[in-house]
Image (cartoon, grey):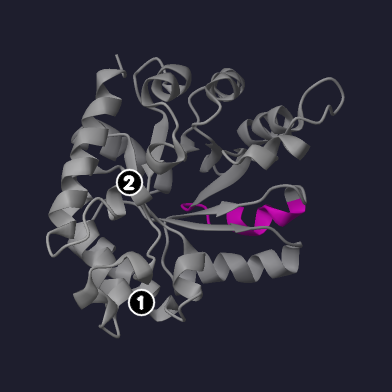
Amino acid sequence: MTFIDQIHRRWADQDTLLCVGLDPDPARFPEAMRARGDGILAFCREIVDATADLVCAFKPQIAYFAAHRAEDQLEDLITHIHERHPGVPVILDAKRGDIGSTAQQYAVEAFQRFGADAVTINPYMGRDSIEPYLAWADKGVILLCRTSNPGGSDLQFLDVGGERLYERVARLAATEWNSTGQCALVVGATYPEEIARVRSLVGDMPLLVPGVGAQGGDVEATVTAGRTPGGTGLMINSSRAVLYAGRGDDFAQAARRVASATRDEINRYRA
């Protein structure tokens, strides 16, 4: 099953647009987890098992694993998700962007080594830097478009022939670059007007929307701006607000409560 098929099935079968980001920071773990050699895997695995029925996808951020020499734990985590929670897609948040020959190796890393169902990439080196990922016809390729950080406007708002740069990326992603039908876009929740603009350009293409929760994005504004006519089309990511909802031994149950409340809040505005 392709990445896009998996996402559509999760939207329909589980009635959820929530994506939980897995950004493990051992300094914020319960003490017992910090003492374990496999603490990153153990922490994330408990979060996954507590929230899997509430999400449309999980999104591990590779830097949080690599910084602690825990890439092997990331491999084991993604294997765990696929084996224990089949049908829940995994988006490797790597934001890769390089020339074609290097991009080929990054694609192998994401899809073969880690076994991810999709990967985030930076499209600002153009089509030839994206094509190696599209060679994996069933895998998702999620392009940075309008990011949630304040500095995103430095470049993404530049005029390029009568349209803003992020609008050009959205249009290309929905047409010329989407040869497999597996492309999606990253559009930050902190800019609902731009979410609406991207939606108008790309039709029903899925949007990965970071920025709710700890980053302060407004759920109602995000859903209203980005939903498709059918009330889907969004993977709304929350990371820290879910992961660190509790600091004690019941951290996974606390994460589930916050994830459930976030999912329910998103669903209130989908109609």
Residue 85, quarter of picture: bottom left
- The picture places residue 131, in percent across and down from the top left corner, at 67, 54
Q: Secondary structure at mark 1?
A: helix
Residue sitting at x 70%, y 34%: 172
Q: Nearer the viewer, residue 93 or 181?
A: 93
In reply to whether residue 4 is colored magenta, the answer given is no
Q: Tell whether 250 sits left or right of 244.
A: left
Residue sitting at x 54%, y 46%: 142
Q: Nearer the viewer, residue 133 or 240?
A: 240
Residue 105, quarter of picture: bottom right
Circle nearer the viewer, 1 or 2: 2
Which mark identifies residue 73? 1
Q: Is residue 138 something that shows in the picture? A: yes
- The picture places residue 166, in percent across and down from the top left corner, at 70, 32
Residue 17, quarter of picture: top left
Specify start and end residues of the magenta stretch as a single range.
Answer: 128-139
Q: Tell whether 261 sits left or right of 161.
A: left
- The picture places residue 78, in percent across and down from the top left corner, at 33, 66
Q: Which residue is label 2 attached to?
A: 241
Q: Earlier in the sequence, mark 1 or mark 2?
A: 1
